[in-house]
Image (spheres, rainbow, N blue to C red):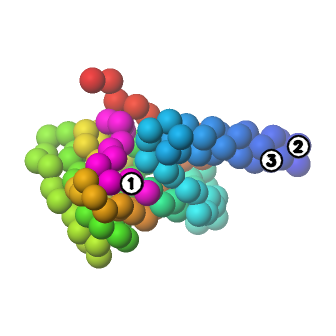
Amino acid sequence: MRNLKTMSALAAGLALLNFQLAYAHGDGQEEVKVLQEQALLNAPGKQGLLLTVDYAPGQRSVAHSHAGSVFAYVAEGAVISQLKGGEPKRYKAGESWYEPAGSVHLESRNASDSKPAKLVVWILKTDKQAVLDPYPK
């Protein structure tokens, strides 16, 4: 049983590393930093993930979906966010929004072409789900 837990932890760590490498400024995408990832004892099979998303001026995310629920808070600057079925909305520092599990995030971008923006994001997902899945155009 101990080896199974170790293997699970190692697999989760590798998946997280791949997530961090795939979404860094080097490939033209926003910079994502995982601050904390934690299994939730009161919700077996679930985990919370706390991360930051840094957008350079004019930068945007690719369209994507999250299998888990998402809370996003604008810590710096302003962002434009649009979920499938809704209109784009502008959120400035100090404002937040919620994305239900399975939502398609069509647009997430820095609202400014001259100033950076930063999100703090908390995601609740199962321990087997990807953090995000690219959404086909």
Query: Residue furthest toward the bottom?
Result: 94
- Asked whether, in this view, residue 88 is left or right of residue 59, the answer is left
How dense is the environment of label 1, judged by Cα within 10 Å: few (below 14), some, or many (20 and up)? many
Q: Which residue is mark 2?
A: 3
Dividing the image into 4 quarters, which one contains the N terminus?
A: top right
Mark 1 or mark 2, which has the lower sequence index?
2
Q: Which residue is mark 3?
A: 5
Q: Nearer the viewer, residue 35 or 27?
A: 27
Dividing the image into 4 quarters, which one contains the C terminus?
A: top left
Q: Which residue is mark 1?
A: 55
Q: Amino acid at mark 2?
A: Asn
Residue bounds of the magenta highlight: 54-65
Q: CA distance from mark 1 to mark 3?
A: 35 Å
Residues at circles 3 and 2 in contact by the CB criterion of under 8 Å: yes
How dense is the environment of label 3, judged by Cα within 10 Å: few (below 14), some, or many (20 and up)? few
Q: Is residue 105 above or below residue 80?
A: above
Q: Residue at x 88, y 48 (%)?
A: 2
Residue 62: image location, x then y, percent: 35, 36
Q: Which mark is residue 106?
A: none
Q: Residue at x 14, y 49 (%)?
A: 88
